[in-house]
Image (tube, rainbow, N blue to C red):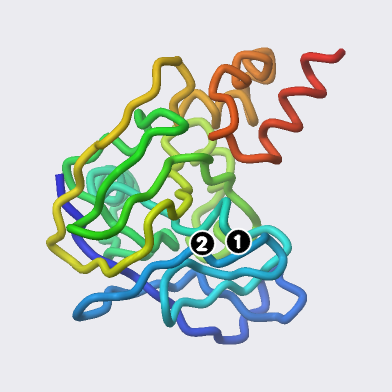
Amino acid sequence: MELLSVNVAKPYPVPYTDAPEGVTGIDKRPVDGRVHVSAPGPKGVGGSALAGDTIGDHRHHGGSDQALYAFAREDLDGWGAELGREFTDGFFGENLTTRGVDVNGALIGERWRIGPDVVVEVNAARIPCHTFASWLGERGWVKRFTERAAPGAYLRVIEPGWIGAGDEIRIEHRPDHEVTVAFLFRALTLEPELLPRLLAAGDALHPEARETALRRTAR
């Protein structure tokens, strides 16, 4: 399992972003060399964990609970074959393009060591938004992406450090429950009856997903 590329974006104005600033950071591109990773701070204030990266909409993206976004090269290739397009690393807005990692089958609370220094924790699934749909330019994209239920994973930074393309990814901890990234995504989108079962992931679960699951359980 390896980190295929580390991808960052610079802000630029676009008409389709949800961000109040009118800029997006979805166009992420691979960078050379090693990049520093650190916990960015609370959502709304903190941005990306990657030095030099851009978050356009701080209300919905970034912060320590969505510090990094990982997406598998295998899933990029699958979409490319289906849509008749070639997607470069970072095109889906991911900070980390992986190879050989079952990103969607990763458990909430699972921890990965990337290279010698950095440890991250899987804690959330990407929910497609208007900006993503407009960026892809595919008819019915949000529905298609949702039905696939292979959203990629948001990560917390547990141990900061430096990462770069070619780094090995090793699973250091895998918790004992059923809540994978794909399971979480299905619960938050197409199968809300699964929401109470998300609580098995405990404190590792993204706070917003946990709040949603608690509301459903109370009802």
Amino acid type, label 2 = Gly
Q: Position of residue 125 (x, y in %)?
A: 52, 40
| Residue bearing the label numbered 2 | 137
Residue placed at 54% from the left, 24% from the top?
201
Residue placed at 58% from the left, 48% from the top?
128
The quadrant where residue 111 appears: top left
> Of helix, strand and loop, which one carries label 2?
loop
Q: Position of residue 84 (x, y in %)?
A: 28, 53
- How packed mark 2 is, by other alpha carbons closer than 10 Å (few <14, some 14-19, many 20 or more), is few
Answer above or below: position of 148 versus 4: above
Mark 2 or mark 1: name the one nearer the start of the chain: 1
Give residue 63's mark.
Answer: 1
Residue placed at 17% from the left, 41% from the top?
100
Cα distance between the residues tagged 2 and 1: 27 Å
Q: Position of residue 76 (x, y in %)?
A: 30, 50
The quadrant where residue 63 appears: bottom right
Camera-side residue: 200 or 86? 200
Q: Where is residue 119 in the image (x, y as percent from the top left)?
A: 33, 51
Please identify the quadrant where the N terminus is shown.
top left
Amino acid type, label 1 = Gly
